[in-house]
Amino acid sequence: MRAPRRRGRVGQERTNWTTLVILLLCALTVLLPLYVTVSMSLKSTSQAVDGNAFSLPAPIDFSGFAQAWELTNFPVAFMISLFITAGTVVGTVFLGALASYAIVRNWDRRLFRWSFFYLLTALFLPFPVVALPQIQLTGLVGLANPVGVIILKIMFELSFSILLFTAFLRSIPLELEESARIDGATTWQTFRRLIFPLLAPMSATVAIFAFLASWNDFMMPSLIIADSAQQTLPVVQSIFQTQFSNNYNVSFASYLMAMAPAIIVYLFTQRWVMEGVTQGAVKG
Amino acid sequence: MSTPVSTAAASAGALVDEAEHGSVDHLAGSGHDRRGRTRVDPVYYWFLIPTLALFTLTITVPAVLGIFYSFTNFIGFGDWQFTGFTNYIAVFTDPAILASYGFTFGFAIVTVLLVNVIAFLLAVGLTSRIKLKTPLRAVFVIPMVISGIVIAYVFNFLFSNSLPAFGAAADIPWLSESILANPDLAWVSIVIVTAWQSIPSTLLIYIAGLLSIPGEVHEAADIDGAGAARRLWSVTLPLVAGYVVINIIIGFKNYLNVYEVIVGLTNGGPGTATRSIAMTIFTGFTGGDYAYQMANATIFFIIAVAISVLQLRISRGRAAN
C-alpha cells in the first residue's frame, strides 16, 4: 500500500511522463492517416501505385493536385459545399434565434409553447426515417438541388439550436429589454440591436454544430441532389472513386483538398470548437 | 482552460433549470401589464410562423406521408392500394432486413464500448499533470472536423494495401488479405474508422466531466492511500457516471445511423455482410421497395424514439438528484 501512494504523490507534483508518452503514441494514430494522405498526394503516379502508404514522396510531385482539380471539377464542388454550409449556418442561427425569441417571450401562449415541443421532435427523427419521402417530395417541387439540401438541413438542425437558444434566452433579464422598449424600440429593433448580439456566444455554438453537420455531410446531399454536377465535396469523392482507379496520388490529392478547408478553419477556431461542442453535447 | 468547465457546468445547470423552472417564467412574456393578457405583438408571429410552416412541409409531411405509404404497396410512383400490415409482417421475416438490424446493433454496441473506454482513458490522461496538454488536445479533436466518407477512403487504402503487407511480412495468414474482403472481419474496419472519427466529441464530454470533479476529492483519496488504478475505478468513474450515460446514449443513437463510413469502406459487402439499417432503407428508392422500406423505416423510427425517451428519462433523473 505504500509504494503506490508515494508514486501517486510524485505524479501529482511533477509531469507524468508515462502518461505523456502513451498519449503521444495515441496521437500518432490520429496523425498517421493524415500523414498518409499528405504524403500520398505528393507522390508521382508511378511511386504511389506501389501501395507503400508510409514512404516519403520522392520526388515531390504536385501533378496529382492538378489532375484531381480538373477531374473532380474541384472549384464547383467546393463552391457548392461552401454554399450549402453557409446557407445552413446562417439559416439555422437566424431562424433558430427568431423562433426561440418568439417562443420564450410568449411562453404563456399555447401556440408558442406547443411550437417549442413541436420543433423539438426532429431531435428524435433520424434522417434515414424520412429520407425516402423527402427525396420524392424534393424531386416533385424542383428542390432536388443544393437549395433543397439547405432547407432540409436547417430544419433538422433547428431543434437543437432552439433548445440552446431558448435556454439562454430564459437567462436574459427582462429589464434589459424593457428599457429598450421604453426608448421606443419595436420588437424587431429590440431583437436586432439587443437580443441577437446578446445571443452571440450561443450563436457561435449553434454555428459550429451547423458547420460540422453540413460541411462534412454525405448522406443527405448524395440522396437529395439529383444532378451529380451539383454535388458537394464529400459526395464528389465517391462519384469519382472508379475514375481515380489506381492513380492514388490523384485520389489522395482530392481527399486532401476535401479535408483541408475544415481542418484549416478548425486550426483557427480550436478553442471555440472545443467549447462549443462540449457545451452543445452536454446539453443536447 | 477553465472556460470549458464552466460552460459545461453552466449548461448542465441550465438543463436542470429548464426542467424544473421551465414553466415559472412563462408570465414574463406578457410584459408589464397587470393581470390580463396583452395582445401578442404580431411581429412574433412573423418570427415563428414561417419556420413552423417550413418545418411542417419538410419534416412532418414527409414523415406522415412515409408512414402512410408503409401501409400500402406503393413502389415510388404510380398507383397503390392499401395492404394493411402486410409490409410490417414481411419486414419481420425478411432475413436481409433482420441481418441489417443484427449487424447495425452489434456494430453500435461494440463501437460504443470501444469509443467510451478509449475516450475516457484519453480524457483522464489529458486532464492529468502533463506537458503539451493543449497541443495534444487539439490533435485529438482533429478527426471530428474530417468528413467520414473521405477518411473512410483513406483507411480503405490502408486496409487493402498496408495492413495485408504487414500481415504478409509478419506471417499472419488472416491478416495477409484485405479485411475488407473478409465477411467475418469487414465489420472491424467499420468499427475502427467510426471510432477514429467519433472519439473526439466523446473525449470532450469526458474532459468536461473530469474537470468538474473538485481537486480535494483526489487529494482525499490520495491521503487514504488509494493507488492510481483504484482511484480511477472507485473515485473518478462514479463521479462522472452521468457523463458516461450521456456519451453512451448519444453515441449509440449516432452509430445506429451508420452509413457513409460503410460506403467508403465496404459498401455493405462483402455480399451483404456489412449492410446497415440506413443502407437497407435507401435501397427502397431504387429497388421499387418504397412502401416496404418505409415500413422498415417506421420500425427504425420507433426504436429511435424509444432510445430518446430513455435518454430523457435518465437525464431527468439526473437533474432531480
Image: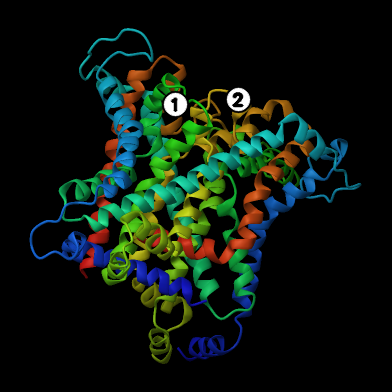
Q: Is residue A269 above or below residue A70?
A: below
Residue for point 54% across, 45% down: A86
Q: Which chain is mark 1 on?
A: B
- Residue of label 1: B282
- Mark 2 and mark 1: span between their CA atoms? 18 Å
Residue for point 54% across, 39% down: A84
* Image location of residue B19, percent across then percent down: 22, 62
* Tag 2 secondary structure: helix
Say which of marks 2 and 1 sits in front: 2
Q: Is residue B93 above or below residue A210?
A: above
* Image location of residue B62, percent across then percent down: 33, 28
Q: Residue furthest front?
A: A184
As drawn, is A60 to the left or to the right of B187? right
| Residue nearest the observer in this picture, B29 or B93 | B29
Image colouring: rainbow
Confirm whether circles 2 and 1 share one chain.
no
| Residue nearest the observer in this picture, A229 or A257 | A229
As drawn, is B75 to the left or to the right of A111? right
Residue for point 54% across, 29% down: B269
Q: Residue furthest top?
A: B79
Residue for point 68% across, 29% down: A240
Question: Callout 1, which amino acid?
Answer: Phe
Question: Which quadrant of the view contains residue A66?
Answer: top right
Question: Which quadrant of the view contains residue A15?
Answer: bottom right
* Image location of residue A251, percent across then percent down: 73, 36
Pointer 2: residues within 10 angstroms few (<14), some, or many (20+)?
some
* Image location of residue A101, percent across then percent down: 31, 55
As drawn, is B137 to the left or to the right of B307? right
Q: Which chain is mark 2 on?
A: A
- Residue of label 2: A228
